[in-house]
Image (tube, helix red, strand yellow):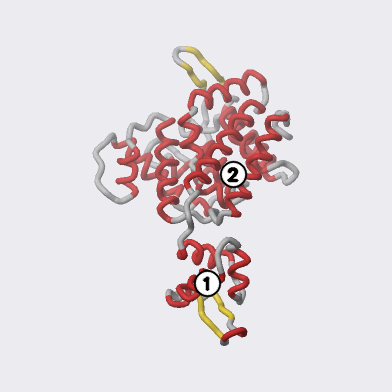
Amino acid sequence: MTPPYSITSLILKRVSSISEKIGEVNANYLSRPEPQLRKQNKIRTIHSSLKIEGNTLTQEQVTAIIDNKRVLGPKKDIQEVINALKVYDDLSVFDPFSSKSFLKAHKLLLNRLIDNPGKYRNQGVGIYQGPEVAHVAPPAENVPYLMNDLFTYLKRDDELPLVKSCVFHYEMEFIHPFLDGNGRMGRLWQTITLRKANPVFEFLPVEAMIIKTQDEYYRALSASDNAGNSTAFIEYMLQVIEDSLIELLNFNSRILTDIDRIEYFVSITKDEFSRKDYMNIFKDISSATASRDIRKGVDLNFFEKSGEKNQTNYRIRLSR
């Protein structure tokens, strides 16, 4: 069964804009961000997602934990960061279409924080805003089959991955399958689902954008609850994703170094290549720059050379 939502003109506009920006990311060789940017985005993601849930640690303290330094703070908050780090360190081990993988991620995220992490709730829950009940989640006995239906929907290939990821995020929050950790699991699983569609999403600090618009986040959830469909939430999340891509492009509006070019070329090249092939990837560099890059690649054991003069070719070294 398809969860209820409508494809509005705003959704189509944002999907189109996001697709264009993903093209810009790839065209500017940003699909593999440099290690420092990867680390910074991971720090921001973990800090923001946990802060939304009430974690009191600063971004500097989160950085210190990631760097294996001693941090003074609430034991629970420190454990939350340690758990999140284990999950975000290797997102590739999680299958976005598997409920078993989903439960495994929850077990890691909530390890030592609640009883029986990695298991669906066995009691009813209500979500409060102040003294009032804002949402009563479906009965506990319905959770397993509701989640199975949701994963069946996620596997469908006739839906746009961008839209599916938003629908899953909203519907999971509506079902509220766990006693604790639902918010961070919704955000995590959207990242994992998007990453399956395009690797660039591993490096987008979507959670950092959500925390900047946290009131809008909860308003979008509430609007979708009131409407009985996820349309409002899809529109909101697509804007968050687009803003994250804009930030990535702005951060990377820098001049690439020779090492940036060499590392990117190694990441996308498997076969033998010539200087012309190298210049076909980096169209804005001169032949002299391409030659210098390739010589440096040879000197640093990225490339191995064969032939002379017009017959010169190169290969990527498989081990360095």
Q: Count neighbours of disc 2 (C-alpha within 10 A) and say few if under 14, some if 14 to 19, many if 20 or more.
A: some
Foreground: 319 or 174? 319
Image point (52%, 37%), residue name? 187
Q: Would you say 309 lies left or right of 6 here?
A: left
- Seen in the picture, residue 93 relative to 165 is either above or below; the reply is below
Q: Quadrant of the N terminus?
A: top right
Q: Can residue 67 be seen in this view?
A: yes
Measure the alpha-carbon separation of dots 1 and 2: 53 Å
> Which dot marks residue 288?
1
| Residue 254 x, y percent position in the rendering | 47, 52
Amino acid beneath label 1: Ala
Q: Would you say 204 lies left or right of 276 here?
A: left
Image point (61%, 84%), residue name? 310
| Residue 279 x, y percent position in the rendering | 59, 68
Badge 1 marks a residue whose secondary structure is helix
Image point (73%, 46%), residue name? 157
- Seen in the picture, residue 275 relative to 221 is either above or below; the reply is below
- Seen in the picture, residue 303 relative to 268 is either above or below; the reply is below
Badge 2 marks a residue whose secondary structure is helix
Image point (63%, 50%), residue name? 23
> Which dot marks residue 99?
2
Q: Quadrant of the C terminus?
A: bottom left
- Tell how many labels: 2
| Residue 269 x, y percent position in the rendering | 59, 68
Amino acid beneath label 2: Ser
